[in-house]
Image (cartoon, coloured by chain):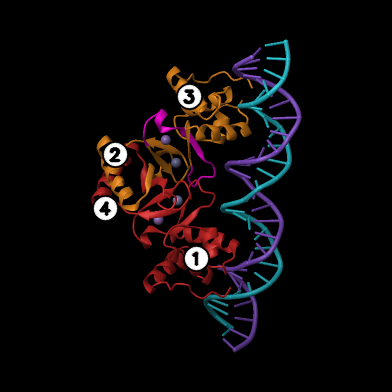
Chain colours: A orange, B red, C cyan, D purple
Amino acid sequence: MSIEPLATIETELDEQITDLLRRSDQRFTKGRRALVEALLAGGQPMTIPQVLEADTRLAQSSAYRNLVVLEAAGVVTRIVTNDDFARYELAEHLTHHHHHLICSSCGDVTDFALDDQAEDELDEALHKIAAATGFTVEAHRLDLVGVCSDCD
Amino acid sequence: MSIEPLATIETELDEQITDLLRRSDQRFTKGRRALVEALLAGGQPMTIPQVLEADTRLAQSSAYRNLVVLEAAGVVTRIVTNDDFARYELAEHLTHHHHHLICSSCGDVTDFALDDQAEDELDEALHKIAAATGFTVEAHRLDLVGVCSDCD
DNA sequence: CCGAGATCGATAGTCATTCTCATTTTTGGA
DNA sequence: TCCAAAAATGAGAATGACTATCGATCTCGG
Ligand SMILES: [Mn+2]
Ligand SMILES: [Mn+2]
Ligand SMILES: [Zn+2]
Ligand SMILES: [Zn+2]
């Protein structure tokens, strides 16, 4: 494969990803870089068909396999909804903590963030739950399900 | 099919479900009643294999089909996680609003509720988001992902 | 430059879920 | 009660997102 960047990854992000991959004995290859660049350029969680359309040089089988590798390394997050396809986005520790608007009509997933106060209050309430249930919390997920402005 | 109830559905709930189904031109048949009873007895979101194991008289193909019917009628909710199987539970307006603990180890999904104050604060924050984004909110979903006490 | 090992990608396989259709059950008149 | 039309059932086939396979290609240290 010979792939030229669509959008160049900033040096720091590149190094972070290289490092995450190295920790799971994986290389930051051209194909993997192209996937990250597509997700970065997309600006919202993307299905694999969307990724393949955004960069037609990518092979489907490699995209599936490499997104699994990238997820295991903590570079991307897999988002599963009621839609037929899973979606991927850059992991939160490479971007920032946020939540999702999920359109029940078209399936689109977009990001939103709570203001700090609301997020803090939520965290506090969730810590109580965790303590009360003996559940070891790794993450919380908050989605708004509804109809996006495009779908009216 | 000849199915005797495992756990009897209370009259009021039975009438609500009958009504919901009638609104989508569907009947509350024995097979559908058995599904609802299994979910009720299960006490937590169940996969279809779990439902079939709980009531071995149920046919797999009918269970799949009827859970789709029950979901369309608003009787049950389909919960999709990273696990292989989707899960079903009674819809919130037949029970109460709540959220989910999702075990990333065994896949189990259990319920929890925020205290009223935390839920109110969350609702308020989400209304602001909806207003700011032009998103028409149908529901919010809050999950805690982590490791359940059974899995340590 | 070389060779071991990693990665690639076309293709085949898997399996949760959906579809098909012949059979059974239900329903609402006659 | 009897009948026919409509709905529901369930065994099995089909679908399709995703994963596994494996020979070709690339990468990197020596
Ligand atoms: Mn996101
Ligand atoms: Mn629940
Ligand atoms: Zn939409
Ligand atoms: Zn568990």
Residue A40 belongs to the span the image colors magenta: no
**Tag 1 secondary structure:** helix
**Tag 2 secondary structure:** helix
For residue B23, what is the image quadrant?
bottom left
Q: Which mark is residue B115?
A: 4
Q: Amino acid at mark 2?
A: Glu
Tell which of B75 and C8 is nearer to you. Answer: C8
Tell me whether the residue at label 3 lies in contact with that at label 1, contact meaning CB atoms closer than 8 angstroms: no
Q: Are marks 2 and 3 on the same chain?
A: yes
For the residues labelled 2 and 1, the Cα–Cα distance comes to: 38 Å
Screen quadrant of the C terminus of chain A = top left
Q: Residue at x 33, y 48 (%)?
A: A130
Q: Amino acid at mark 4?
A: Asp
| Residue behind mark 3 | A19
For the residues labelled 1 and 4, the Cα–Cα distance comes to: 30 Å
Q: Are marks 2 and 1 on the same chain?
A: no
Tell me whether the residue at label 2 lies in contact with that at label 1, contact meaning CB atoms closer than 8 angstroms: no
Residue A103 appears in the picture as rendered: yes
